Amino acid sequence: MDPNFFIVGGSKCGTTNMSYYLNEHPDVFISKLNEPYYFSRFDVPNNFKRESMITDYKEYSELFKKGKNCKAVGEASSVYLASPHAASEIKKTYPDAKIIISLRNPIERAHSSYFSYQFMHKNEQNFSEIIDEHLKQIGRNEFFIYNILETGFYTKHLKRFQDNFSADKIKIIIFEDYVKNTIPTIESILSFLNIHTKIEFKEQSTGSYRQPKNMISKKLLENSFFRKTTTKFVPTVTRQKIGDKLLLDQTKKPDMLESDRRKLKGIYEEEVKKLEEMLEVKLPWSEFCN
């Protein structure tokens, strides 16, 4: 069974949570491996390593073989939104696919992305230093898949998908609206996927700031063999539940410095104006509501 829809991002915009809800519906099948990154394979260097990434088409197609009795079959890789080749590669491989995109206040998205990046990669740079470094990468027109700022330049990423897929094949969600109206939004996505049967959804856990419980769990989570093995053999939802119970503590995300907030507002102010014109909506992002 070929996939017929993709949740392409953006990163830290609720896409994993959406996929968990959608997968509750009996007519929907989503790959048990979250973030296979297949359509980003041309946008990373040859030595790029990520436990969940698949570059072989046969292996990738195996992800969907159990979805043959479902109307909607898909996967969620939030990196696809910002990946320069993803839109055209999805179109080339699955021309009739539907695309789901979630957009979040780029300031808050960048802050959450920083902590996700720090969680997965040892790095001593603080948030402000990462902002400066990643802004320089963008200035050099150098694509880096983990750049915490790149995804927030939504208009150019949306345009790539709009150039490859007709408007009726793309659904855009505003993350802040999704948080307030989760189930109605999920039902609207199901309708977009031509699924109209109603079900009772179980509440799913949302993303949160997490840190290792102790030094043992920290060492395990930093161990590439452990991460690769669990990614290969343990489904994403199960892996997250085990991690939340045994290895991680959920806590309050550190506050953003006002100086960093002002810096990000300056970076994204013109972008948000362009996005509102493109979508013909007023976005609920307080820093840009002047």
Image (cartoon, rainbow, N blue to C red):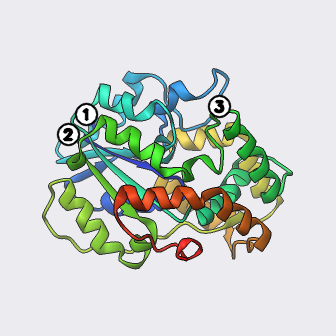
Using the rendered view, name the quadrant where residue 114 is placed. bottom right
Q: Is residue 19 visible?
A: no
Using the rendered view, name the quadrant where residue 211 is placed. bottom right
Q: Position of residue 105 (x, y in %)?
A: 54, 65
Mark 1, residue position: 2
Task: Sort mark 1 into few (<14), some (14-19) or many (20+) by Cα contacts within 10 Å.
Answer: some
Looking at the image, which is closer to me, 282 or 214? 282
Mark 1: which amino acid?
Answer: Asp
Mark 2: which amino acid?
Answer: Lys
Of callouts 3 and 2, which one flags the residue occurring earlier in the amino acid sequence? 3
Which label sits in the foreground, 1 or 2? 1
Q: Residue at x 65, y 36 (%)?
A: 144
Looking at the image, which is closer to me, 227 or 123? 123
Residue 49: give its label. 3
Q: Secondary structure at mark 2?
A: loop
Of callouts 1 and 2, which one flags the residue occurring earlier in the amino acid sequence? 1
Mark 2, residue position: 68
